[in-house]
Image (tube, rainbow, N blue to C red):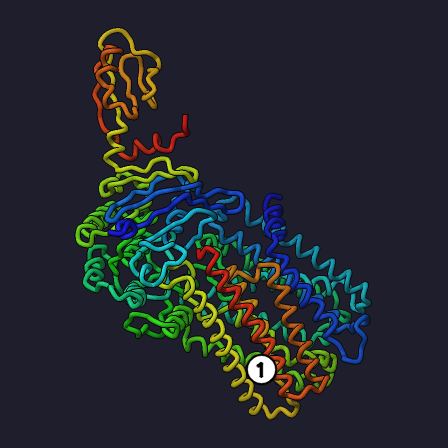
Amino acid sequence: MMAFVSMCRLLGRRANLSRLAMLGFVASWSLFVYQDPELTLDHPRPGGLNLFVLATSALAGHFFAGLGVVELQHASFSWTLPNLRRRLLASVLLLGVVTAFLLVGVYVRLGGPAPWLPVFTSGLLWYSVGIVIAAGDVRGGSDRPWRPYLAATLAIAALFAAGVFINRIAELYGVQPFLFAALTLAGASLCLFLVFNVGAARQKSLVPTPLGGLGDPGSLERAAAAHRRTPKRTWRLKGPVKGLFDWVRAGEYENFASVRGGWAAGAVRFSAVAALIVIALPYVTEAPGLSYLKGLMSIAPCVPAFLAMGYCANNSFFLQKGWLYPLSRAQLARLAYWSSLSYNAAICGIMLLTFALLASASAIEERVDFIRPLVLIFVFNPFFQWLRLRHGPLFFQVPIAGLLYFAGGVGCVGLFRLAENTGMPLPYEAAAAAGLALLSQGLFRYKIEACFRTRDLV
Amino acid sequence: MNHNMQTAFEVKNLTRLFGDVTALDNVSASVPKPSVVGLIGRNGSGKTTLLRHVIGLCLPTSGSCVTLGRPSDQLGPGELSRIGVVHQENRFLEWMKVEQQLRYVGSFYETWDRDLERRMLDELELDPSARVGALSPGKAQKLSIMLAVCHRPDLLILDEPISWLDPIARKRFLKFLLELLQQDANTIVISSHVLHDVEKIINRVICLDRGRIRADAPLDDLQERFAEWRVNVKAGRLPPRFDEDFVRSQQGDSYQARLLVEGASDRLEAFRTRHGVDVVSRPLNLERMFPLLVQEDG
């Protein structure tokens, strides 16, 4: 009971309102967008409904149960608290069963045709996969640090694949409901064993709480592997560091010198994935039996904008917080602004270049407009950069952040559609976008200066 | 000479609220140059908050703080380059090696002393090729100390700098601080709970309790003010409790007692005569003085 109460308290925090906003958005997205474009929104097709169950379960497992479990398991007291592991498992299971039942209820209410049992167990399986991804629980070992990343990538890829082939998978629901239920339950049990076995619990209690999710140290081996990372570049400036350019350089070095290829390599990888999603969609929807994916096409151009907003908001060239640099508050404010702007510009530049290269290489016939959504980064991202400065790297747990993120995304879609449908001449459109960006950037700069003038810097 | 030029920092009526919690309550203090100040107090008494105000990381709710002649919220590169800080919690770029971290931070300061850096690496037995993220807490603290002192700051702020150090490292560090003081005549503020070590180098004590200053005086003055009296009865029995107002605490039995007294150096003879006892007076060290300093009024 105690662990269940702890879990409920963890889940009931204000921070989770933000997660709830994200979850609600993605769930409704999968329910309503994932269908033939000619269908009305109040009659979603089975494909969308089936995916709704899987996606919502996985997200609930990740954002609610998974991150809560991670927080408790990585506490230094977790190993010695009597029966914490078992009680935690019981409460996680209970939450999973309740979630899956609720989702089955929605499924049946909206006219889902499959028997409820395989839908229910599929929900449980993806709920467990969500927890595994959050907990980063696949053992890498010191010589195979890539394994957790591979496992997480496979899990995410499996979720995408399940989305694409959901109608075919759902056919199995009706053909072999009990076999399907047994297989999915076995998969769910394996996932929960990975997270809650004794060895994992022992190791995790020795490692500080990670920031959450993929890529954070989840075991001693991974923490050790992180320690063994070497800076890929040497700090060459002999000093003294003077002027805005040097300080941005220092911020870039602090944030990215340990990453092979620096910020650009990460941006290229990320852009390639975003571009491939957009470029591959028209081909996928043309495949026989996959026409139900056409609804996705309507938001395809905004995918890179959405992803880029999240990517840009999570990094910057700004300096480490809490150190006493020989910089006045006014200089720090100026640096915070220019480091954010230069980072956004750099990422957008890399993304556009990557998109252009991949689009030309794929000989895509339908023109996909990447530029408009990316330009809007300069309108919306200052708000996230501001939240990041104000609340630190976990700013996405601030309730307003999740809502802003989706408001920004929807704003991107809206502005993009408005420009397209009204047939606004390009110079006017460019002027309007520049005006909005200037307004947003000006507000951002004003808020940053006020922040550094009036707030604590710890 | 300008008053500000003689003062390392000065806080006046400084109050800091965190929501409903009063972290600092109308604190006023002035620390001259050069001096070595011990900032002592119980957990949560406001020591770290005060130091963060001095270096401009935190801003007061009311009152003022002037550091190196400038309001601490307006400290510029010139003043900040003259300040060194060891934070209570070490924050490094964990993927660097020790030598890389030193080179990186050193590049921000025109006055970075490479000779001092080499010497400290030797004395503190830090391996330059060790990965910062893999350092033990004690070694991380040594690195933090190096990063704070190698640019030879005029004002050195040390927030719990020796809590993780072993006795040998502590001794070396304190010796080094004394040398630094002799060479550069700078001001050091050291906040610590390891009072018997700190006592060896400080010449002034600021004691905070619940956000208020309980004592702000030279250590010598405090040692004159507080003393332990060992009282032995000559005949008869000692009273269960001595009623003199300078007696702050009493332990013992009917034949001998240990009294902690305050402001009683000139009343020793009168006490002997009144009670017919032998009294041996000893000065109190900071560790034993501390409970008296933070005791509630009355």
The residue under label 1 is which amino acid type? Ala
In the rendered image, is residue B116 in sight? Answer: yes
Q: Quadrant of the C terminus of chain B?
A: top left
Q: Position of residue B224 (x, y in %)?
A: 24, 30
Residue A381: x and y, percent?
Answer: 56, 71
**Location of residue B24 by image quarter:** top left
> At numbered mark 1, what does the secondary structure look like: helix, strand or loop?
helix
State which quadrant residue B270 falls in. Answer: top left
Please give left or right for residue B124 compared with residue A96 in the image: left
- Residue visible at 40% across and 37% down in the picture: B209
Q: In the orientation shown, which residue stands out farthest toward the top?
A: B236
Q: Is residue A272 above or below residue B237?
A: below
Q: Chain of mark 1?
A: A
Q: Can the viewer see residue A138?
A: no
Residue B218: % across, % down: 26, 38
Please tell me which residue is depicted at 72% across the width and 74% down the height of the picture.
Answer: A33
Question: B269 or A268: which is nearer to us?
Answer: B269
Q: Residue at x 33, y 71 (%)?
A: A242
A192 w.r.t. A258: above or below:
above
A62 shown above or below A83 = below
Q: Nearer the viewer, residue B234 or B14?
A: B14
Q: Position of residue B65 (x, y in %)?
A: 38, 50
Name the side, left or right, on which A22 lies relative to A262. Answer: right
Viewer-nearest residue: A1 or A391? A391
User: What residue is shown with label 1?
Assistant: A275
